[in-house]
Image: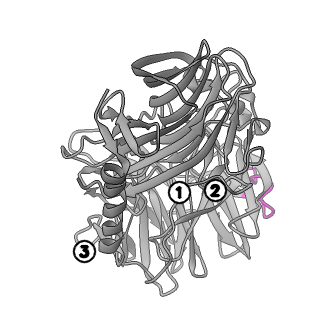
Amino acid sequence: MKKVMMMCVACLTWIGTVADDYETIHTEKVQNPMLWADVPDPDVIRVGDTFYLVTTTMHLMPGAPVMASKDLKNWETVGYIFDRLTDSPKYDMLNGTVYGRGQWATSLKYHNGKFYALLAPNEQGPMGDTYIFSAEKAEGPWTIVSRMRHFHDCSLFFDDDGRVYVIYGTGEMMELKPDLSDVIEGTYQRIFQREEDEKGLLEGSRMIKHNGKYYLLMISHTYAPGRHRREVCYRADDIHGPYEKQVILESEFGGFSYEAQGTIVDTQDGDWYGIIFQDRGGVGRVLTVMPCRWINGWPMLGDENGKVPETVRPLKSGMSQTAIVKSDDFSNIQLGLHWQWNHNPVDAAWSLTERPGYLRLKTNRVVNTLYLAPNTLTQRMEGPACSGSIVMDVSHLKDGDCAGLAAFNSDTGALIVKKQGGKLLLEMTEMTVELSDRDKLVTKTEEKTIEQVPLKQSKVWLRIDGDFRPGERGGKDAANFYYSLDGTQWTQIGTANYRMRFDWRRFFMGTKFGIFCYATKKKGGFVDVDAFTYQRNDGSE
C-alpha cells in the first residue's frame, strides 16, 4: 500500500491552485492543443458568430457530438446527432461489439437555413450504410433524411448551383439527388489520380469553396523513412477537375508527432483558421488551431514558418469559460451532455430519479468482464493532466457484483469494489482485451489484480489521476489510483504510473474515465454514485 495523501493539501492544492494559475496565465490566448482530449476527425463550420464542431466517438452513445464555441477557445457539447444506433445487436454488445467501429468522420454543413450531417459507420454490409441527418438547430433534434451506400471518410458538399455531392475515399465523388434521398446513378467519378508520392494514407476528405475555387483537404502519410504525416490540398476551378495539389501543413508540435486531418473555417471578419488533429498516445487524438493564410490561392496552415503555434489569439475576449469534460453531482433529472455510454445503454438499468442526487447503475446482464458490461458511463480524460473521482454507496451490491471507476480503454486500469461471500473488497486491477477483426467479438480478456484491501464500510471514494505530459517529467500517459474512506485522506493503491495506451486495432480511442457496475453471478444489484468530481490542470508539480 502506498503513501496516504491529504486531499486538501496534496490533491486539491495540486489541482485547484495550479489550475487557477493556468487560467490566469492563458486567459488571453488559445493554448494549443485547443482541445487536449480525444476529439478526432473534426469538421468545423461557422453559422453567424458561432462555430460548430463534430467529432468521432465510434462505439460511445449518444454519438456524433456537436460542440459549439464563440471564440475557438471555449468549447461545449451542445447536442448529439443520434441517441443510439440499432442496425445490429452488436451495438448492444450482443453477438459481438462495435469497439473502434460505429460512427466515424462526420461531415457537417449548413445550407438554406438547415444543418446537415453525413456519416458512415466503419462497418461492412448494411451496418456501414451512410446516414444523412438534418436539423433546424445544431443542438437538435436531428432526423434521418436518408440512408445509402457506404462512403469512407466523406465530405458532404452543397454547390452554389444547387447541386449536391459526396466526396469520399481517395478522390472519389458522386452526385446526390436534390432531396438527398440517394445518389444519382452514373455520376461516379475519380476526380484525381493518386501521385507517385502518395502511396500511403490519403483520406479524410473535407471540401470547401472559396473565391470560386474548390478545395479538398486530406491527410497524407507515406510510410517511408524521412516521410511525415501532412495535410494536403487539391484545388480546381471546376468540381470535376482537373485538380492540382499543394502540401499545406507539415509540422510536428509539442514533443509529439506530425499532425494532419481536419478542415479550415472563416470568421465573420474574413480571417481563416485551420483545425487539425494530432495523435498524442493514451489521451487520444487532440485538436490544434492555427492561422490559415491564403498565399497564391492556397490555404497555407500554421505560423509564418508553417509550424503549429503554441498559442493563437482568441476571436473574442471576455467569453465565459466552458468545457467538454465536467464534474457532476447528478442532481439533474437528465444526464448531462458531457457523458457518453459505452455502446447502447440499457435504459431500464440506470436512473437519476430513483434516489435523487445520485446516479444509480443497476446490474442487468451477467458478464465475466467489464468489456461486456452494459451501462459503463464515460467522459474523456484531458491533458496535460487531470483528476477524476467518484463517491459511491455500495451497500446494495449482490454477491459477484463489481462496481467502480476505470481508466477505460482496450488496456484498462480499474478501481473495483467487489462483493464476495458477503464481504466487500477494493481492488486495483489491470485489464486487457482481445477482439476479433470482423465482428469485434471479445475473444480473450486478461485481468491482473495488483493490490487488494478489505472494506468495512459501504461508502467509498475512488480517484484516478491522469498525466499526459510528454518527456520525462511525469512519465507520459501515466495513471495513478487512489481511494479514501472519508473523502479527505487518500491512499494510493496498485500500479504506480500505469501506462495508458492508444491502440487503433482495438478501441481506436483515447482513455476515458469509466463508471461501471456489473454482475458476474446474478442480476439485481446496484450502486449509487453520489458525485463525479473533475479537475484539469497544467501538470506542474
Closer to the camera in the image, 84 or 182: 84
Range covered by the magenta-colored residues:
176-185
Mark 2 lies on a secondary structure that is: loop
Residue ID for mark 1: 326
Closer to the camera in the image, 120 or 479: 479
Return the disc, 2 or 3, that comes first in the chain's sequence: 3
Looking at the image, residue 334 lies above or below residue 75:
above
Residue ID for mark 2: 337
Residue ID for mark 3: 304
Rounded to the nearest angstrom, the CA distance separating label 3 from label 1 is: 36 Å
| Residue at image point 54% right, 49% down | 532
CB contact under 8 Å: marks 3 and 1: no
The image quadrant that residue 184 belongs to is bottom right
Whether residue 508 appears in magenta in the rendering, the answer is no
Looking at the image, residue 154 lies above or below residue 92:
below
Image location of residue 354, percent across then percent down: 77, 44
